Image (cartoon, rainbow, N blue to C red):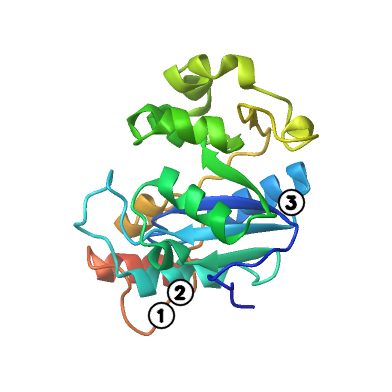
Amino acid sequence: MTLNTRGDRRRRRIGLLGGSFNPAHDGHRHVAEEVRRALRLDEVWLMVSPGNPLKPRAGMAPLAQRLATARAVADGRRVRATDIERSLGTVFTLDTLRGLRRRFPRARFVFVIGADNLVQLPRWAGWHRLAKETPIAVLPRPGWTRRALAGKAAGRLKRHRRRPGALLAGPRPPHAPWAFIPAAEHPASASAIRAGLAPRGVAAAPRPRRPLWPAEPARVQAVAAAAT
């Protein structure tokens, strides 16, 4: 099912998992399913970014190709892939979230990030306002979880932390809460897949007819082929 990027007025609880998805892989689907179950969300959107200002352009596949890999790991119903940021014309996450609330005024959004992004959150434009306006769900990432929970963002937002079941409970508070979602860590990494270093059994999206990633395409294709 294609997402209506123009918006609607349906009441839904929606998780937003943004990123480059360069490429999408099993780990993204794992995170989406874990947060959907933990928070009883109606949907999780894999929001494929046209361009991340904190990531280099070198080695970044075109948006259409990254979106294709996200669609390959989504199911099109509960987990859906979208390039809605392109439609919104936004670069920064704060602006994206505000644009989504305008287009989907009756939806309750949860911003979903890994522990690595909780560490990096203070580098994001307007991160205090983002955390104030939108509930955040943080999931563990190998090698990052302890550092994230002891980091700057977690410290600044300490009094707004809630248990997962309370994240969307009741009316919207003046300051949005955040929660750490206990879940199994998934070993998949897009950078490792691109470099041909993915652990055995970790799959990217199905291999296309031509390389998706401009950096080291032969090695990437070999990893994708071995994983299928």
Residue found 61% across the figure and 36% down from its top? 135
Of pointers 2 and 1, the one earlier in the residue sequence: 2
Mark number displayed over residue 129: none
Q: Secondary structure at mark 1?
A: loop
Along the line of sight, the residue nearer the viewer: 219 or 53: 53
Foreground mark, 3 or 1, reads 3
Residue type pointed to by label 3? Leu
Q: Is residue 60 left or right of residue 67?
A: left
Foreground tag (3 vs 2): 3
* Residue 14 shows in the view: yes
Q: Which residue is mark 1?
A: 208
Q: Residue drawn 27% across and 61% down?
A: 60
Residue 41 circle label: 3
**Residue 218 percent coordinates (x, y):** 27, 71
The numbered mark at residue 68 is 2
Q: Is residue 102 above or below residue 4?
A: above
Residue extending farthest bottom:
209
Residue 184, percent across and down? 65, 39
Rounded to the nearest angstrom, the CA distance separating label 3 from label 2 is 24 Å
Query: Does label 3 or label 2 sit earlier along the sequence?
Result: 3
Q: What amino acid is at disc 2?
A: Ala
Mark 2 lies on a secondary structure that is helix
Vertical placement of 36 versus 87: above or below?
Answer: above
Q: Are marks 2 and 1 in contact (CB under 8 Å)?
A: yes
| Image x and y of residue 40, in percent | 78, 48
- Specify whether 86 is left or right of 132: left
